[in-house]
Image (tube, rainbow, N blue to C red):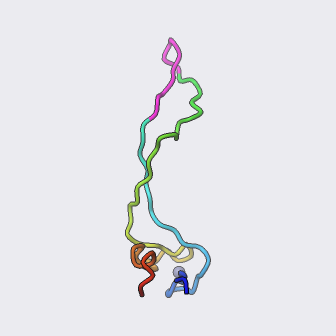
Amino acid sequence: MKKTLKCKHCGNEDLFYTKEKYKGEFEFCMDKEGNPVFNADIHEGATYELRSKYIFCRECDKRVCRIDEFESGEE
Ligand SMILES: [Zn+2]
């Protein structure tokens, strides 16, 4: 049986989140006067890295469980 998330604080079973950040680099295009030119691929090449070890409840913002515990399926 697949483990499911449920907030033991408020009972929410629908919406959860993890905290993440991303970093990356891109080529910022400008014209000969230094004015920025529309950059369509500004987020291409960005890498996302996990910032938190926990899954949080979207409803009450409390910790629900550790991400690694949830993924391993252990209580
Ligand atoms: Zn909750």
Does the magenta-highlighted stretch encompass residue 40? no
Q: Can you give x and y, in whole percent of width and height, for residue 74 in the image? A: 41, 85
Residue in view at x 53 percent, y 81 percent: 5
Query: Which picture quadrant has residue 63?
Result: bottom left
Magenta-colored segment: predominant secondary structure: loop
Q: Does 29 lie within the magenta span?
A: yes
Please count the marks in the image. Answer: 0
Q: Is residue 27 left or right of residue 1?
A: left
Dividing the picture into quadrants, the one containing residue 73 is bottom left
Residue 30, percent across and down?
51, 20
Which quarter of the figure is the C terminus placed in?
A: bottom left
**Which residues fall within the magenta stretch?**
26-35
Residue at the image position 46 percent from the left and 44 percent from the top: 46
Image position of 50 with respect to 53: above or below: above
The spot of residue 26 in percent (x, y) is 46, 33
- Whether residue 37 is situated above or below residue 20 in the rendered picture: above
